Amino acid sequence: MKLSFRNVHKRFAALEVVAEFNSEIESGELVALVGPSGCGKSTLLHMAAGLEKPSSGTVLADDRPVTGPHPERMLMFQENALYPWLTLSQNVAMALELQNADKQDALTKAREWLEKVKLKGFEDYYPHQVSGGMRQRTALARAFVSQPKALLLDEPFGALDALTRMTLQDALRELILEARPTVLLVTHDVDEALFLADRILVFSPRPAIVLREFSLSSHQKTHDLSEYSVMRRQILALLGINAEQDEFAKTLGEVGI
Ligand SMILES: Nc1ncnc2c1ncn2[C@@H]1O[C@H](COP(=O)(O)OP(=O)(O)OP(=O)(O)O)[C@@H](O)[C@H]1O
């Protein structure tokens, strides 16, 4: 699914959030939105999801105006928001049942997608019986099970520790390679953007404008992102972050300080 933002402008009362946004997200492309907190990234996702309307301009999905939410455009948040009273497979199946799928077929598909995110054997566990990473794997399975044409991911792994986040990024990449949805990814993690994205848009503080766009080669990436070190520094500089300080903060995070 192609997503198009044409002269999109958004304000909430007196608050100008998006100044002017123009972008074409091609079918099957993964575009990461990176920018300071509160600049309007989630608002852009919400407009693509049909949860918010632009104040002016248009958002198109396959050249048709987005007028409201649709299961073809699936939004996934940082908080996995699984239903605590349902098992992992019932949680995943729910996405299909909401689209009137047969209950038994939905459960069968749910189990298949749980296997793809390496949760075979945990299908009948409840969310509180598994780790945060496993809950977020379940949320990924739930996002993919109905095979949406566009996935709108809002800091999907923001609440996870660095190591778990990387394993989830691997899982997401595998699912994307298999299902090939169009993906808009909001993230604060520049390395996550470098690892997953075909293109990175770096935004200014609110009201959001695109400061610079980076295109990445689409060959198989690893978490060793040294070949992107120049791009990484440029992105951090645009965000006003000193690369050395960021390395220091990451090291502290990794040793759990
Ligand atoms: N429904 C709403 N009503 C009023 N103001 C809103 C609404 N949604 C977002 N805002 C405001 O718009 C601004 C941008 O919010 P948004 O969540 O899009 O930023 P963000 O870049 O995603 O931030 P973060 O990275 O911290 O999640 C914020 O000041 C927020 O308070």
Image (cartoon, grey):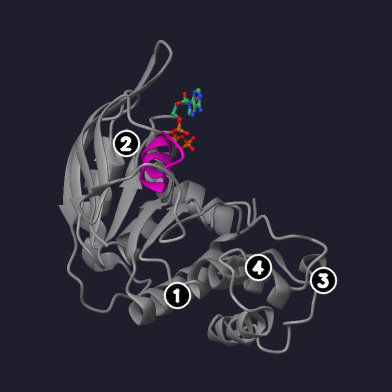
Mark 3 vs mark 2: in front: 3
Mark 4 vs mark 2: in front: 4
Spot occupied by residue 133 in the image (x, y as percentages of width and height): 64, 67
Q: Which residue is mark 1?
A: 170
Q: Counting residues from the N terminus, which is met first, the one under dot 3 or under dot 2?
A: 3
Is 43 situated left or right of 90 in this image? left
Q: Amino acid under label 3?
A: Gln
Mark 4 vs mark 3: in front: 4
Question: Which residue occupies 18% across, 41% down?
Answer: 212
Residue 131 included in the magenta stretch of the image: no
Residue contact at pointers 3 and 2, CB within 8 angstroms: no
Q: Counting residues from the N terminus, which is met first, the one under dot 4 or under dot 2?
A: 4
* Predominant SS of the magenta segment: helix
Q: Amino acid under label 1?
A: Asp
Q: Counting residues from the N terminus, which is met first, the one under dot 1 or under dot 3?
A: 3
Q: Which residue is mark 4?
A: 94
Is 100 situated left or right of 243 in this image? right
Is 103 situated left or right of 84 in this image? left
Alpha-carbon span between mark 4 and mark 3: 19 Å
Please provide the residue range marked out in magenta: 43-52
- In depth, the one of 97 and 169 nearer the eye is 97
- Choose top left, top right, bottom left or bottom right for residue 229: bottom left
Q: Secondary structure at mark 4?
A: helix
Q: Counting residues from the N terminus, which is met first, the one under dot 4 or under dot 3?
A: 4
Q: Is residue 32 positioned above or below 114 on the image?
A: above
Q: Which residue is mark 3?
A: 129
Question: Which residue occupies 41% across, 79% down?
Answer: 174
Question: Which residue occupies 32% across, 33% down?
Answer: 240
